[in-house]
Image: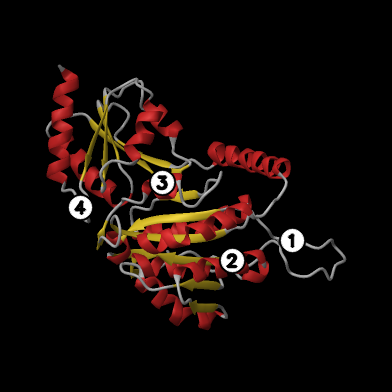
């Protein structure tokens, strides 16, 4: 049996990324993700990698662009305001079809906000992480183990679809410690070759050019159409969700990340009171797991979106439900974490309302 180690979420992300073959990390310190960068600074040189604290978040994401263009597995991390600064560079990466992994350990906002945990970057991650027509794959872990697992697999997904991938955590998950089974390390030399990378042309292939600027409208439109065909494949094949007690649930709670841990406790308490509640936990925020939600439609009488914000994922829940059942929302914001009792109260009230 694999040995478990006790790690912070931030540390698990860093260690797992290196085990996935990441050999370049460019970042900038900001609470509550600074431990991730600090861990990388100690460990990366020991595995033959490069750690560099950039002069700014803008510089860091552009360094990621350069390393990704050269075919390397590369990662950056930050927290909410820092990710905003990276937005332009992420758009450039999407426009150049470059893989890379971006970690966002969210804090309260808007603005500098506070350093407490939040989920207020959902819209940014799934809707507007930069200008232009593009998507990125967004994962939402709920445990330290899942942070390690998703950081490991994110590089494969990024390479497969030539797209940036984000892991959207929060300050609670980044700072908490849990036992983790770490994945087996990969030798970067054994990874598949990237024939599109700018690694020279010793093998007499044509020059590779990595670029996101196209001055001809028809050419850019053609590339965007091709990119959206790839996004359609991602939507078809990469949706991920966990369901818990949803088979007969009257009230289905939808929650991701840290909020889902609270929601699970509330669902258990509701069941003890005889209220048929269940939990649907999106693991991918984009693509949103519409199929998993669709499977709950025949039995669910109502949905409750529980979030650590003023209501963001609830929009996607309502789109997926498409008017076939009422969708309610409960959230806390500014770094306040909802309690199981608060969520239980909303579940019971919703159950009474739809049971009338």
Q: Nearer the viewer, residue 123 or 188?
A: 123
Question: Residue 163, how many percent across, how many down?
Answer: 58, 52
Mark 2 or 3, nearer chain start: 2
Question: Of circles 1 and 3, which is in front?
Answer: 1
Give the answer, above or below, for where 176 lies relative to 162: below
Residue 283: which disc?
Answer: 3
Graded by Cα atoms within 10 Å as few (under 14), some (14 to 19) or many (20 or more), the crowding at tag 2 reads many
Question: Residue 38, how many percent across, how many down?
Answer: 39, 77
Dot 2 corresponds to which residue? 73
Question: Residue 130, how many percent across, how many down?
Answer: 49, 52
Dot 1 corresponds to which residue? 209
Dot 4 corresponds to which residue? 337
Question: Residue 70, how many percent across, how many down?
Answer: 67, 68
| Left or right, 105 with reference to 326 | right
The residue tagged with tag 3: helix, strand or loop?
loop
The Cα atoms of the two marked residues, 1 and 3, are separated by: 34 Å
Give the answer, above or below, for where 66 lies relative to 290: below
The Cα atoms of the two marked residues, 3 and 4, are separated by: 19 Å
The residue tagged with tag 2: helix, strand or loop?
loop
Question: Of circles 1 and 4, which is in front?
Answer: 1
| Left or right, 316 with reference to 194 | left
Mark 3 or 4, nearer chain start: 3
Graded by Cα atoms within 10 Å as few (under 14), some (14 to 19) or many (20 or more), the crowding at tag 4 reads many
Give the answer, above or below, for where 167 lies relative to 325: below
């Amino acid at each position: 049996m694999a040995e478990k180690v006790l790690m912070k979420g931030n540390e698990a992300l860093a260690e797992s990324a290196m085990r996935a073959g990441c050999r370049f990390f460019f970042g900038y310190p900001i609470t509550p993700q600074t431990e991730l960068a600090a861990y990388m600074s100690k460990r990366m040189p020991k595995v033959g990698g490069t750690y560099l604290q950039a002069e700014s978040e803008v510089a860091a994401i552009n360094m990621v662009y350069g390393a990704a263009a050269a075919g390397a597995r590369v990662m950056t991390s930050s927290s909410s305001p820092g990710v905003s600064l990276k937005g332009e560079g992420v758009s450039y990466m999407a426009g150049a079809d470059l893989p890379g992994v971006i970690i966002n350990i969210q804090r309260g906002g808007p603005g500098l906000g506070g350093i407490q945990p939040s989920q207020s970057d959902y819209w940014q991650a799934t809707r507007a992480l930069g200008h232009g027509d593009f998507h990125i794959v967004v994962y939402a872990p709920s445990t330290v183990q899942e942070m390690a697992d998703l950081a490991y697999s994110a590089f494969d997904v990024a390479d497969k679809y030539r797209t940036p991938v984000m892991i959207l955590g929060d300050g609670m998950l980044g700072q908490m410690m849990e036992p983790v089974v770490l994945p087996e390390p990969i030798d970067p030399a054994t990874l598949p070759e990237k024939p599109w990378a700018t690694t020279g042309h010793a093998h007499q292939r044509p020059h590779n050019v990595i670029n996101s600027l196209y001055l001809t409208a028809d050419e850019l439109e053609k590339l965007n159409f091709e990119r959206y065909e790839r996004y359609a494949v991602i939507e078809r094949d990469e949706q991920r969700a966990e369901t818990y007690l949803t088979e007969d649930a009257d009230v289905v709670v939808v929650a991701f990340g840290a909020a889902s841990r609270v929601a699970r406790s509330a669902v258990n308490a509701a069941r003890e009171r005889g209220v048929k509640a269940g939990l649907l936990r999106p693991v991918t925020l984009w693509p949103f797991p519409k199929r998993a939600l669709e499977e709950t439609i025949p039995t669910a009488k109502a949905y409750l979106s529980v979030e650590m914000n003023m209501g963001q994922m609830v929009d996607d829940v309502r789109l997926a439900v498409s008017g076939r059942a009422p969708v309610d929302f409960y959230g806390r914001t500014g770094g306040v974490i909802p309690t199981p009792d608060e969520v239980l109260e909303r579940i019971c009230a919703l159950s009474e309302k739809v049971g009338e």
